[in-house]
Image (spheres, rainbow, N blue to C red):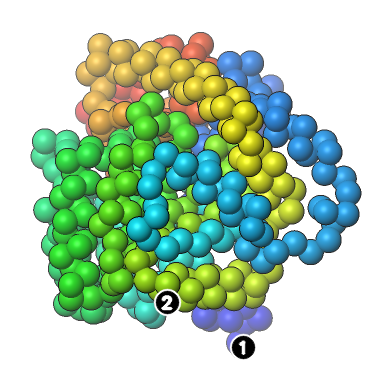
């Protein structure tokens, strides 16, 4: 008999087990087991609470009014758009290109709307070999497929050659290119692409755009956890655009403002022609309208009412700087110890995560749970450690524990 569920229903293909492992860790903790939970991408303080921005709390506390309760703009509104531009692009010159800001449900919403509208059915989204597992599902939901470029070459630099091959293949096969990059502070490695590597990537894309439409989607979810300014990279990207080459940035208010559950974010599109940007605005708006209709009004207010003031932006950046310092201290503890015990990590620059290349990663993770009640995530042929949700005290000794389990399984 035919099942109720359609045979064409959506199936997750890439084993999204991060939230499952987090749940398992929390269940063990509730039973009184002393667990160490390094699974999720939320930033916790050394006291074990999600980090807080008083300016954000203030907006939430004062949002119980009609402006919150009524239907808002499908894309966030003019004030929202201006504040997002001031926060993200206040340090670059975007006068030579056209732009549009679409309020979304998190960076996830921005990724989803962009892939839906800028890939043809079955077209491959070019993604790195090491990546956040949810990308595959988002692409599949959009009717796209996945094609993988190698993230690191033998020297542990960005593998520009592999990317070039995939871009050329896409021009040949689909007559268009859709490239997804997660930079800076990549999930799961913490890698940030170097300026020189960006020069090469942009030259490849510019060249491809002479033959086919090219869309670069930069997932900047962890932008505000980079120690070095990303403005020079954004400027390079914007200066490379033409009528056949578009860039979209996926912004996450979850990560920047620590409001994961409020689902705030934006997709900001840039290209040279007015027609190209009008198409972007119309298509993204219509897609949003048919899925979630309009973004969360409280998240939009938190973004707009904080980012629209220079004084508040400065206070937020100061606080972010403090949180970044905590992440750096945690990373330093882990990496120093890892070196001591010969545990290799991919090149970490900054951000919430680092990744240890590891054969049989699922077995090693199971061993760590069994032996140490230590929860980390098997992902992309490695073990991902979420520095964001571990205290410095919990990180001390962790590299040694992982090395022990690694050796036990892999010999
Ligand atoms: N992009 C990356 C690389 C992420 O790691 C995450 C969340 O973990 C997201 C996007 C989604 O963030 P949001 O909560 O803004 O949808």
Residue 129 percent across, percent down from the top left: 27, 51
* Residue at 27 percent of width and 48 percent of height: 236
- Secondary structure under badge 2? helix
* Residue at 54 percent of width and 75 percent of height: 282
- Secondary structure under badge 1? loop
* Residue at 22 percent of width and 46 percent of height: 198
Residue 251 percent across, percent down from the top left: 50, 49
Extreme-front residue of the structure: 95
Which corner quadrant holds the C terminus? top left
Location of residue 56 by image quarter: top right
Residue 236 lies left or right of residue 144; in this view the side is: left
Residue 37 lies left or right of residue 346; in this view the side is: right
Closer to us: mark 2 or mark 1?
2
Residue 115 percent across, percent down from the top left: 43, 67
Q: CA distance from mark 2 to mark 1?
A: 50 Å
Identify the residue under disc 2.
275
The circle on residue 228 is: none
Foreground residue among 35 and 97: 97
Seen in the picture, residue 12 relative to 379 is either above or below; the reply is below
Seen in the picture, residue 379 relative to 288 is either above or below; the reply is above
Extreme-right residue of the structure: 65
Residue 95 percent across, percent down from the top left: 39, 55
Foreground residue among 21 and 297: 297
Which corner quadrant holds the N terminus? bottom right
Name which of mark 2 and mark 1 comes first in the sequence. 1
Foreground residue among 289 and 79: 79
The circle on residue 1 is: 1
Q: Mark 1, residues whose alpha carbon is within 10 Å: few (<14), some, or many (≥20)?
A: few
């Amino acid at each position: 008999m035919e099942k109720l569920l359609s045979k064409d229903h959506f199936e997750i293909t890439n084993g999204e087990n991060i939230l499952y492992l987090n749940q398992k860790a929390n269940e063990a903790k509730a039973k009184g087991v002393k667990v160490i939970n390094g699974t999720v991408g939320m930033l916790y303080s050394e006291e074990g609470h999600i980090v807080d921005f008083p300016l954000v709390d203030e907006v939430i506390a004062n949002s119980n009014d009609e402006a919150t309760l009524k239907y808002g703009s499908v894309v966030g509104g003019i004030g929202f758009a201006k504040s997002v531009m001031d926060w993200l692009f206040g340090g670059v010159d975007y006068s030579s290109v056209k732009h549009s800001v679409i309020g979304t449900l998190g960076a996830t919403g921005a990724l989803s709307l962009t892939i839906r509208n800028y890939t043809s059915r079955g077209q491959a989204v070019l993604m790195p070999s090491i990546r956040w597992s949810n990308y595959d599902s988002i692409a599949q939901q959009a009717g796209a497929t996945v094609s993988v470029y190698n993230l690191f070459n033998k020297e542990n630099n960005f593998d520009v050659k592999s990317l070039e091959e995939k871009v050329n293949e896409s021009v040949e096969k689909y007559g268009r290119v859709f490239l997804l990059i997660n930079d800076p502070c990549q999930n799961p490695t913490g890698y940030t692409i170097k300026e020189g590597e960006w020069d090469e990537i942009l030259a490849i894309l510019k060249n491809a755009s002479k033959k086919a439409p090219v869309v670069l989607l930069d997932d900047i979810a962890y932008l505000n956890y980079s120690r070095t300014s990303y403005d020079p990279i954004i400027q390079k990207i914007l200066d490379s655009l033409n009528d056949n080459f578009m860039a979209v940035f996926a912004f996450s208010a979850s990560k920047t403002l620590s409001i994961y559950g409020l689902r705030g974010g934006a997709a900001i599109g840039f290209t040279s022609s007015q027609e190209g940007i009008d198409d972007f605005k119309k298509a993204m708006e219509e897609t949003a309208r048919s899925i979630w209709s309009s973004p969360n009004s409280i998240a939009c207010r938190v973004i707009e009412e904080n980012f629209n003031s220079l004084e508040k932006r400065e206070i937020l950046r100061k606080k972010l700087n403090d949180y970044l310092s905590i992440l750096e201290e945690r990373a330093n503890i882990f990496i120093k110890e890892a070196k001591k015990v010969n545990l290799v990590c991919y090149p970490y620059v900054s951000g919430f995560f680092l990744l240890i290349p590891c054969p049989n990663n699922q077995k090693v993770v199971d061993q760590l749970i069994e032996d140490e009640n230590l929860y980390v995530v098997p992902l992309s042929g490695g073990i991902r450690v979420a520095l964001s949700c571990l205290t410095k005290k919990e990180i001390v000794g962790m590299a040694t524990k992982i090395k022990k389990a690694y050796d036990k399984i892999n010999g």
